[in-house]
Amino acid sequence: MDVAFLAMPHRTTAQVVLEILISGVRIVDLSGDFRLRDPQAYLQYYGAEHPAPQVLREGEFVYGLPELNRKAISRATFIASPGCFATAIALGLLPLARAKKLIGPIQTVAATGSSGSGANPSLATHHPLRAVNMRTYRPLAHQHTPEIVQALEGAGGRDIALEFVPISAPLPRGIFATSFAELPSSVSKDELDQLWNDCWRNEPFVRIPAERPPEVAGVSGSNYVEVGFALGPVTGSTRRVICFSALDNLVKGGAGQAIQSFNIMMGFDEKLTLAEPGLWP
């Protein structure tokens, strides 16, 4: 065996990983067990002591967001594939972080489809309760919060404090994220257009729609992400920027991104197999 893809519950994965690490088999892990570097953050957001804190501290797992860590992924032996919300929100804000313009508090509201809850049925995914409803869950306490902050600070953001409110939406798949940040009043729309274009020009799976805002229907079933922004009026010394991002939580937010990182790690064409849509559910 050359590579093991792990798609198991948190905490279960960490126990299995300890058995694999010494075997020489490469790992692409889709759980949240090795995304964070701080065992205390894991305890706070996942509700348990990490089963292998030394692995976190030693940084053996590379965070598998290709748009942020492509070079490190190409040299990696172990990859921690990002969460679906974390991917959408981080990519929506990445141009600002890379330009060193993302400083201080961020507010994000992001809606996700029912498949984001996993394969096991629950009241949260039961069609009569989900299809005609919108509700929040784990507001300000979602487990992807520290992962997003870690990724954005790794990209160049400073003093990030994220207030994240996830929304359960009446659709089977997809995530739409709206993030709010403050910029100096001197920042112009042309400057931000240039930042977005520079950031995404060579990224095979990130698109900036020209004729419409980002939307879930534009990426459903695919590994693509759509991004965009709106710039608010000047208020004193600042002005607000609203960043939008949309992706399919099961593809770019899940299995597709894991395959994308696998392709990079193995030296394959990054887009290999990812042009074929995932149609179910």
Image: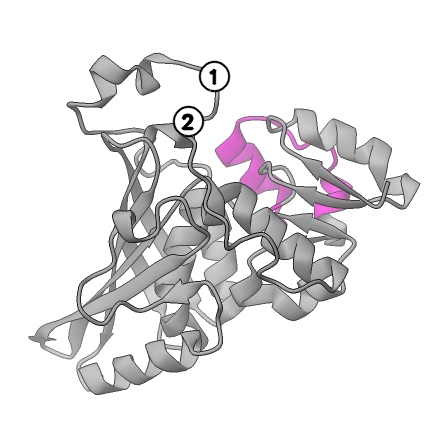
Magenta stretch in the rendered image: 35-56
Residue at image x 68%, y 53%?
262
- CA gap between label 2 and label 1 equals 8 Å
Is residue 231 rendered to the left or right of residue 46? left
| Residue indicated by mark 2 | 117
Q: Nearer the viewer, residue 145 or 171?
A: 171
Q: Could you say which is closer to the camera, residue 84 or residue 96?
A: 84
Q: Quadrant of the C terminus?
A: top left
Query: For residue 1: magenta?
Result: no
Q: Neighbour class for label 2 at 10 Å: few (<14), some, many (≥20)?
A: few
Residue 84: image x %, image y %?
Answer: 45, 44
Q: Secondary structure at mark 1?
A: loop
For the question of whether residue 171 can be seen, the reply is yes
Could you say which is closer to the camera, residue 26 or residue 98? 26
Label 2 element class: helix
Instruction: Tell me, for residue 120, which label it has, or none.
Output: 1
Q: Residue at (17%, 64%) from the top-left corner?
A: 212
Give coordinates of residue 124: x percent, y percent. 32, 19
Is there CB contact under 8 Å for labels 2 and 1?
Answer: yes
